[in-house]
Amino acid sequence: MGKIILFYIIFYAALIGFFAALLAVFYQTLDMKKPKWQLDKSVIGTNPGLGFRPMPPLIDVESTLIRYKYDNRGNIQYWKEQLDDFLSIYKAKKDGNRTNVESCIQGVSPAKDKVCELIIDASWKPCLPEYFYSFNSSKKGPCIFLKLNKIYGWIPEYYNSSSMPKNMPPDLQEHIRELEKNYSIHGSSEMPNVLKTVWVSCEGENPGDMENIGPVIYFPQRGFGGQYFPFLNQDNYLSPLVAVSFESPTRGVTINIECKAWAKNIYHDRVDRRGSVHFELMVDY
Ligand SMILES: *[C@@H]1O[C@H](CO)[C@@H](O)[C@H](O)[C@H]1NC(C)=O
Ligand SMILES: *[C@@H]1O[C@H](CO)[C@@H](O)[C@H](O)[C@H]1NC(C)=O
Ligand SMILES: *[C@@H]1O[C@H](CO)[C@@H](O)[C@H](O)[C@H]1NC(C)=O
Ligand SMILES: *[C@@H]1O[C@H](CO)[C@@H](O)[C@H](O)[C@H]1NC(C)=O
């Protein structure tokens, strides 16, 4: 009996020791700031996904339906709190070591180890907590926030007016053409900084949805500014956001919405939901 117990004590001690040694070797090969496998070599790959907030309650994991009644406080409080939580890291912060945070020029990445300041200020109105992110409006629809998933080292390849794909929404194409016309320096072939943007579009998925979605406005601009790329796990890094304001969605119907991110190196796949995100919106009377 004593021998058996002794055997097991030694056996497990050896096992634990062996495992700890392997783990130690494994940690030796890791860099805490840099992933070992990057871009093409990693499982996550090079194609960023899009995410939306606020998310429906977790009880219903499969659900992507944002449904509420604008004049029911209890109803809209849930969505406001979800956004308050999500955006709390974007509040102007003063604590911690923020010596590497800079205000940047649109489209111009800061020096290595520096990051661009990102503050949700009054220009995002009405996509602000003070305005209930528009969830309480009797006329307008809500603000939904989009975020591009972080991929270490990923650098967008930007579109210009002559390289836009045919399936890009016509209003986005027109927007890019107009910006290029307004900001190109005459005689220069250099891309204007305003075009160094990962563009965003949100559309109704089916003909009925296209009719019901109504006008859409994007804050602070129609995409993610190029100055926020690449993500290199810098201290104080915050992912860029776009707030999508649905100006007058049809009430009382479910609207299927697909938002896409646009850069030459973002591929769209509806099944895999790559480079795009789907949700449904229903504003009750
Ligand atoms: C903040 O970090 C920088 C390097 O990122 C360092 O040089 C500086 O001393 C730090 N300041 C404080 C107050 O810790
Ligand atoms: C929405 O809520 C905000 C904050 O409570 C309030 O100032 C605003 O008047 C409300 N808007 C409507 C349309 O009820
Ligand atoms: C657009 O970009 C392509 C390269 O992708 C370049 O050859 C072309 O000159 C650019 N067109 C304009 C109008 O800047
Ligand atoms: C381009 O300039 C025109 C005329 O100044 C202006 O009306 C338009 O809004 C500008 N477009 C963009 C996208 O800035």
Image: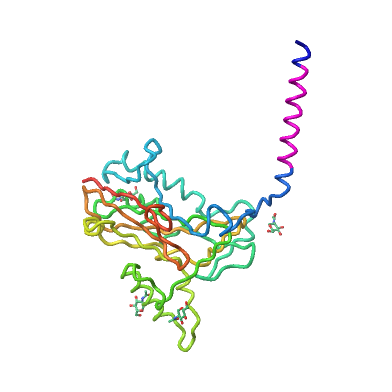
Q: Position of residue 127 (x, y in %)?
A: 38, 55
Q: Main secondary structure of the magenta part?
A: helix
User: Residue 38, relative to residue 2: is it above or below?
Assistant: below
Q: As drawn, is 10 to the left or to the right of 106?
A: right
Q: As drawn, is 16 to the left or to the right of 52?
A: right
Residue in front for this viewpoint, 211 or 220:
211
Q: Which residues are magenta?
A: 6-24
Residue in front for this viewpoint, 179 or 95:
179
Q: As drawn, is 59 to the left or to the right of 102?
A: left
Furthest toward the bottom, the residue is 187
Furthest toward the top, the residue is 1
Residue for point 49% across, 69% down: 157
Q: Position of residue 18 (x, y in %)?
A: 74, 34
Residue in front for this viewpoint, 11 or 184:
11
Q: Position of residue 182 (x, y in %)?
A: 40, 80
Quarter residue 126 falls in: bottom left
Residue for point 52% across, 59% down: 46
Residue in front for this viewpoint, 16 or 96:
16
Residue 66 magenta: no
Q: Position of residue 253 (x, y in %)?
A: 22, 48
Please state the total of marks drawn on the protein image. 0
Q: Quadrant of the N terminus?
A: top right
Q: How is the image coloured?
A: rainbow
User: Residue 19, relative to residue 255: is it above or below?
Assistant: above
User: Residue 81, relative to residue 168: is it above or below?
Assistant: above
